[in-house]
Image (spheres, rainbow, N blue to C red):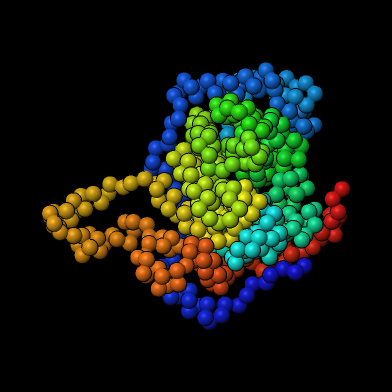
Amino acid sequence: MNQTPPHPIRQGRRARQAARAAEVTPRLGTIRYGVKPVELVSRDELEHIHLASLWILKEIGIDFRDPVALNQWKKAGADVRGQRVHLDPDLVTGLLAQAPDRFEMTGRGADTRFEIGVDTVSFCPMQGAPNIRDLDGTRRFSTLDDLRRINKLIQMSPGFHMATGFACEPTEIPVPWRHLHINHTNLVETDLAYFGLTTGQERAEDSIAMARIAHGADFLEQNAVIMGQISGNSPLVWDSTMLEGLRVFAAANQVVLISPFVLGAANTPADVVATVAQLNAEAIAGIAYAQLVKPGTKTIYGQYSVSVSMKTGAPMSGMPEVSQMNALVGQLARRYQIPWRTTASQASSKSFDAQSGYESATSYMAAVTSNANFLLHAGGWDEAGMVHCLSKLIVDAEQNLLMAKYAAGVRFDRLQEALEAVRRVGPGGHYLGDEFTLKHFQDAFFAPEILDYEAYEQWQARGSKDTQTRAAEKAEALLRDYEHPSLDIARHEELDAFVARRQTEISPSIA
């Protein structure tokens, strides 16, 4: 295997790191919402959507195209007709009640533990892109080296709670082997919790086995370190590939993200409320199944939602209907007391331009004002997920810090002290030299590094650099300063050996 070994720390890097030590921003930990969520509909209207979802599951049913799942549903008392499962409302709600309302995730690092709960928010970069937009703006197929670079940038960026797993596809590696290398780089280049691969039992088992090597079997049994995304096949289908992965992750006490895939008006009705009713039916059926597999399974109510252009059929990010769907899903998830996920920084733009920024800003604010608990794709997403943009990854990492501060709400513990400053300064004065300002200015207002707020002349004197250029320079600096997180050499070697052995056991050809 051609694995990247840890590099010795050069003196120049040590000097740069020491110089910046006092300015290091700590990694985001558990963030509890201090802002109240948008309530788009009344309690009665929300109940109407909930009951519509239960009606869909009972009267229309939902396909579980997996013999193991069908047998489990039969034993639970569901009405199973071929692959179609008709679910009684009491069975669904009883299983939903077993899903925890909060749980912790952690990596190996001392600052990597955080809580996902119905009152928290957390950020994870994008995943699944087959293409990369490099720091020089070049668009091309992504490789394993790109995935390693992305993981290094994630490790160096405090605005992410966890690594994304398959941030981009290592397209030069045969598909049957990719999951091995994706897991390996996440475990070696980062010390964060991350996404494993759930596309089938074998890949899920390999993901869990590799996490067990890196963390230790006992630690993995007691801690959630890896998440599996279980994607639905809308409308109203859960297939065996995903359900196999769900069962493996649930059995290992790890986290499952149950995520219908909504293309509004394409695989759902052309109506916001009806779309959410179908989406919710799919999601709660998946969550209920996770609890049927293992009661208490750590579960996130997921959904990926975009509207579809009636002109081209292309997905559209940042649309008002998607923001409305987010608000409705948030209300439903809070009704069930289950943490929920949305997409944070999605954009359909073909370049890192104004459209990309507008779309992402809308998605971010819709997510946070709806009190989403897990913000996936909060870093790098462009071109409807077909591209991982490295410069945007850096800008989004900073946006996560801004969003985290907004989400935490305002504080009152300094109010009396601040009012004394008002007394001291009085009418017509200024606060720049006041003792309250000198004491609190560093954390009173967020000061972005990538976004530029200089006067035009200052900006021009510094080279007239746009956001993408500044972000690229920041990324290059982070990569220069990067060093591998601590991993016991014996565990590292065992991971290498596991990948090498599994590659001899798995055919590189797709059957």
| Residue 235, position as x, y percentages in the image | 69, 30
Residue in the foreground of this view, choosing between 13 and 263: 263
| Residue 501, position as x, y percentages in the image | 81, 60
Q: On screen, 84 above or below 219? A: above
Q: On screen, 23 above or below 76? A: below
Judge from the rendering whether residue 186 lies leftward or rightward of residue 473; answer left or right: right
Residue in the foreground of this view, choosing between 456 and 447: 456
| Residue 170, position as x, y percentages in the image | 72, 59
Q: Is residue 68 visible?
A: no
Q: Is residue 331 visible?
A: yes
Quadrant hosting residue 277: top right
Rendered residue at 61%/53% (across/down) = 350
| Residue 480, position as x, y percentages in the image | 56, 73
**Quadrant for the N terminus in the image:** bottom right
Rendered residue at 70%/35% (across/down) = 233
Q: On screen, 118 above or below 498? A: above
Q: Residue furthest bottom?
A: 11
Q: Residue furthest top?
A: 59
Quadrant hosting residue 132: bottom right
Q: On screen, 448 above or below 267? A: below
